[in-house]
Image (cartoon, rainbow, N blue to C red):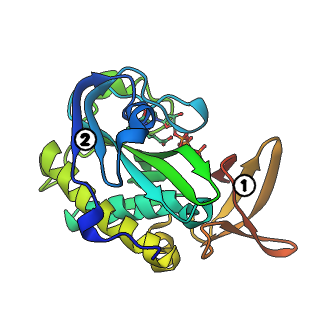
Amino acid sequence: NEGVLKSQISNRSFYFDEIPSTNAFILKHAEELVSGDICVAEYQSAGRGRRGRVWVSPYGCHLYFSMYWQFPQGMAQAMGLSLVVACSIVSVLQQLGIEGVGVKWPNDIYLDSRKLAGVLIEMNGQTDSECNLVIGIGLNMAMGEQHGALIDQPWSDLTGQQSVPDKTELLILLQKQLQQDLALFQQSGLKPFQQRWNKADLFQDQPVKLIMGGDEIHGIYRGVDEKGAVMLDCDSGVQSYIGGEISLRKV
Ligand code: ATP
Ligand code: BTN
């Protein structure tokens, strides 16, 4: 059975006032953890993004948390996971009546075209038969100009939105949505999320460039395929691209 039963998903959480990185905590303690365990912090002194980038993580009203998840069928079963997690975040924000939420492949959540939240997935250990991952989420609730000045791209937060719950309520909503979506993903793969992602995708049918190492490929962006790969409409037809080193930019 590839799926995970609801009764097997943990609701345990490890809470810290201050920690270097909630992802690092989960990775360090992975041996003692089970799917669904989370680590939450008020402040991260070394919050991280993809490829060694910094996630600005000041004290205040923000969410920083990581969830542990085990894929018993190995790496192939986890392909496209960052898209699933982004879909979960979008669903919760939409349930709260927040409009203007969009996603950028493979891990970013935008509000009114500025970055609101990010997802960082890291691996604890991988064997042919098992893949254990940490899913880290950072979401800005009330950033303020002083801390916002540390972020080197346009950012947004939830200030000014109606009916925003407090941090604990938002965390619980995300935790529940993630548990539900991850169980579905483990059972059925990316198919149930492909449409959800493409509907929220900010770059749909736009001219983009795909940056891969030193190379740049230009084309019209056509969303993601059933494996979570970027579909790019180029002179030679629609090609799929996937990999942790790829970045996408509007041109
Ligand atoms: P890509 O992965 O396509 O290159 P990206 O530029 O957003 O996209 P990521 O690694 O996904 O890169 O995210 C890290 C980046 O997010 C940082 O380099 C910074 O520009 C931005 N960032 C850091 N902290 C925050 C924050 N609290 N809120 C919004 N954006 C942030
Ligand atoms: C990104 O956009 O690059 C991903 C940012 C992910 C940030 C979160 S905050 C909680 C968890 N702990 C970390 O150190 N990073 C992730």
Residue linked to disc 1: 209
Dot 1: element? strand
State whether residue 6 appears in this view. Answer: yes
Measured along the vertical axis of the image, is residue 25 above or below residue 7?
above
Q: Which residue is drawn at 45% across and 36% down?
A: 27
- In the image, is 181 to the left or to the right of 81? left
Query: In which quadrant is the C terminus drawn?
Result: bottom right
Q: Which residue is drawn at 23% across and 61% down?
A: 176
Residue 178, how many percent across, how many down?
Answer: 32, 61
Residue 53, how many percent across, how many down?
Answer: 55, 30
- In the image, is 213 to the left or to the right of 1? right
Label ID, residue 141: 2
Query: In which quadrant is the N terminus drawn?
Result: bottom left
Q: Which amino acid does label 1 sit on?
A: Lys
Q: Residue at x 72, y 55 (%)?
A: 209
Q: Residue at x 39, y 34 (%)?
A: 29
Q: Residue furthest right?
A: 236
Q: Nearer the viewer, residue 92 or 189?
A: 189
Mark 1 residue CB less than 8 A from any atom of ligand 1 = no
**Which tag, 2 or 1, sits closer to the chain's start?**
2
Q: Which of 21 and 51 is in front in this view?
A: 21
Cα distance in 3D space between marks 2 and 1: 30 Å
Measured along the vertical axis of the image, is residue 201 above or below residue 70?
below
- In the image, is 251 to the left or to the right of 21? right
Label ID, residue 226: none
Measured along the vertical axis of the image, is residue 27 above or below residue 11?
above
Residue 109, how many percent across, how many down?
Answer: 42, 53
